[in-house]
Image: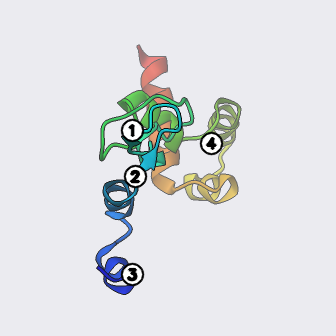
Amino acid sequence: MTLVRLIERLSNKQFMTELDKIVEVTDVRSGASVRPASAAQVCQCGCGTRVAVGRKFCNQAHYDDARGLATADADQVVAKFHQGVSKRQLAHEYGVSFSAVKRLLRKRRDQTEH
């Protein structure tokens, strides 16, 4: 297969999967052919936990934590919201989506109700 045909076949979604199929590394000690562990097989939150092929996070809690704000920033967002700052302004100020702000405020509201 030529390099051009190979590049045409690879899309962003398939890139790591196809690359793992193509690339093989020889283990220096045993001489055996080994597939490299790709970044797509490690939890994207940074914990280093291995995940199943096609997954980005090892569980829902890691996904939720990675897509939200840091705890200190989340506390500031809630405080500013209670002071009257709009959700859209908070989203813009902290560089997150409007949905992330709504989700954070809903989560904090539900925690205080229980």
Residue holding disc 1: 32
Alpha-carbon span between mark 3 and mark 2: 17 Å
**Rendered-image quadrant of the C terminus:** top left
Under tag 1, what secondary structure? Answer: loop
- Camera-near label (3 vs 1) is 1
Q: Amino acid at mark 2?
A: Glu
- Camera-near label (1 vs 4) is 1
Q: Residues within 10 Å of mark 4 (few under 14, many from 20)?
A: some
Residue holding disc 3: 3
Q: Residues within 10 Å of mark 2 (few under 14, many from 20)?
A: few
Under tag 2, what secondary structure? Answer: loop
Location of residue 88 in the rendering, given as x and y in whole percent from the top left corner: 57, 58
Q: Residue at x 64, y 60 (%)?
A: 92
Residue holding disc 2: 24
Residue holding disc 4: 81
Can residue 105 be seen from the camera position used here?
Answer: no
Sequence-wise, the earlier of marks 1 and 2 is 2
Q: Residues within 10 Å of mark 1 (few under 14, many from 20)?
A: few
Q: Amino acid at mark 1?
A: Ala
Q: Quadrant of residue 69?
A: top right
In the foreground, 87 or 8: 8
Alpha-carbon span between mark 1 and mark 4: 58 Å
Q: Amino acid at mark 4?
A: Phe
Q: Is residue 57 above or below residue 9?
A: above
Alpha-carbon span between mark 1 and mark 2: 10 Å
Sequence-wise, the earlier of marks 3 and 1 is 3
Under tag 3, what secondary structure? Answer: helix
Q: Is residue 38 above or below residue 61?
A: below
Can residue 99 be seen from the camera position used here?
Answer: yes
